[in-house]
Image (cartoon, rainbow, N blue to C red):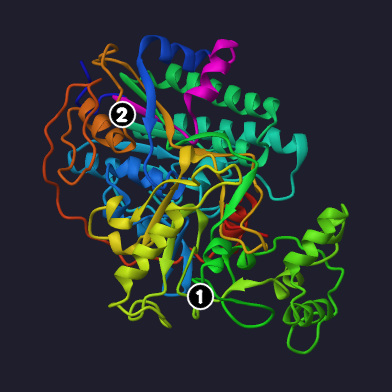
Amino acid sequence: MSRHDSDGLGTLLVGLDGACLPVVEPLVAEGRLPALADLLDRGASGPLESQIPPWTPSAWPSLYTGTNPGRHGAFDFLTFDGYDWDVVNRSHVRERALWELLSERGRRSVVVNVPVTSPPPAFDGALVPGYIGPESPPTHPEGLLDELRAELGGYRVYAPDDVEGDERVEWYRRLTGMRGAAFRHLVDRFDPTFGFLQFQQTDTVFHERPEDDEAVRAVYEAVDAEVGAVLDACDPDTVVVASDHGVGPYDPEEFRVNEFLRERGYVETTRGEGGMPSWGQISRDAGGGDGDSDSDGDGQSLGERLVARAAAMGITSQRIGALLSRLGLAEFVLDYVSTDTVRAGTERVDFTRSTAYMRSRTELGVRVNLAGREPDGTVSPAEYPSVRDDIVADLAGAETPAGDPVFSTVAPREAFFEGEHVEDAADVIAVPADFDTYLSASLLGDTFGPAAEPWNHKRDGLFVAAGDGVDTDASLRDAHLFDVAPTVLSSLGVPPSARMDGDPLPVVDPVPPDDYPAFDPEATRRTDDERVEQRLADLGYLEDR
């Protein structure tokens, strides 16, 4: 049965961002993933249904807390305060992580590279944060990153910004190797009962090289090699593999939500100076061209002033961009024109004058400009229910160019979330049918247009459990993301929290839930890191169009 004391690694949780059976099974069949093939062969496996929204910054906190976003409070890459915003971090997650619950019960953990874990609260064990955090994130205990860099000869969270092409694929491999080496070192040092090792590149490769089969194979082969090395070195009793969502091809046409809302009178826009830019326009430029760097006294370049004046007359950056694309000159021009110049002429959502709008495409929602909640709200509390009902009805009726519904479900946020933080969610949630349509918050003149990415997130991820006490004949038909944390805790004989929305999967003997000390939230901390924001823009999470 499962090891319930602290003598050796009892349960290893391997996180594979974006992994799913349609991607993994063909690679296993080709003989490229021997470690994962062995786990699939001797364990129980199946699809793992993700949550809404199925994106990294909300889904991983749901996985490691066992709660829905309405309870833990992280809905998206961005968190909002009126019209202000910040990139989400661990201080926005208002529930205990499973390793913190284990600490309450005297179990030590090692956690490496899990998203949205910076800055880490104290617990019994070691944690090195991963994705969304800064390149040199705070660790627990302090100084762990310096130790790893000295011990391993280097450790990075992200690839260098200036690597491209085959060199970038090589960095995928190197980052993957760093994760495995760091985990093995920390397990050897801390002797934990539980270990959580996450690999992000299995998702990143599909955003950066979506149809590059060789790059995908390279990433998965590197991950498989590290999983095999960890299994050999750490010899866990039980192994759980889980992903936060799946990935797959999308339709060639994207749906531009704010254009749709503008046509129906909800969105007001502004051009040139003034107004609130959409997230695509405020994503920072890490290396824009300097072909128009002659600035005036107020910091605007000549190019910015000219483009802004053109925008005021209706000649926006979007229209210029569409013309340049038809002429095949867009990439050439953008090599010599800075992002600030493009931004100066971009038509933008005017949040203060609009009735409703999409702020961030990955929260899958529309926000109402509600008076008393937003600084310049235009919708009174009395009007709010009817306005929201109208938005639901309008979006539910949206159709693709082929005449199919864009959305499978459109409903108020209460239909998807429950808990203390539901009111932080978007007011209306819209779920794309089969997750086949890319949603955009950009204003580009038409409701539909070429999709920004040919592959993106799908609802079903992957779950595998193998080892001591695992019932390989158990059904995983209804396995859900929220079930991972209570399953891991049960595998160690530790009660899940009574606040969890998931239940132990039948692959392990369930342990009844119990109460834990109330979560004591620290003050939220701002991420406020331009490099983090730029990385999100580079991966398409902050739209840079």
Between 500 and 126, the one nearer to me in the picture: 500
- Position of residue 220 relative to residue 98, above or below, is above
In front: label 2 or label 1: 1
> Is any part of residue 94 visible from this angle?
no
Residue 32: x percent and y percent? 59, 15
Is residue 22 covered in magenta? yes
Q: Which residue is identified by label 2?
A: 479
Residues in magenta, as a range: 9-33
Q: Would you place residue 100 above or below residue 311 in this image? A: above
- Res 92 visible: yes
- For this view, does 305 lie left or right of residue 52? right
Asked whether disc 2 touches disc 1, contact meaning CB atoms under 8 Å apart, the reply is no
| Type of the residue with mark 1 | Phe
Q: Residues within 10 Å of mark 1 (few under 14, many from 20)?
A: many
Q: Residues within 10 Å of mark 2 (few under 14, many from 20)?
A: many
Between the residue at mark 2 and the residue at mark 1, the CA separation in whole angstroms equals 39 Å
Give the residue number, with chain letter if any, for mark 1.
Answer: 351
- Name the secondary structure under disc 2: loop
Question: Where residue 481 sits: x, y (%)?
Answer: 34, 36
Q: If the image is split into quadrants, where does the C terminus sit?
A: bottom right
**What residue sits 65% from the left and 47% below the top?**
451
* Amino acid identity at mark 2: Ala
User: Residue at the spot x=31%, y=51% of the render?
Assistant: 122
Residue 506 included in the magenta stretch of the image: no
When the figure is inspected, residue 10 is found, relative to residue 378, above or below; the finding is above
Whether residue 129 is situated above or below residue 262 in the rendered picture: above
Q: Is residue 142 left or right of residue 439?
A: left
State the SS at label 1: loop
**Front in this rendered view, residue 463 or 436:** 436
Q: Quadrant of the N terminus?
A: top left
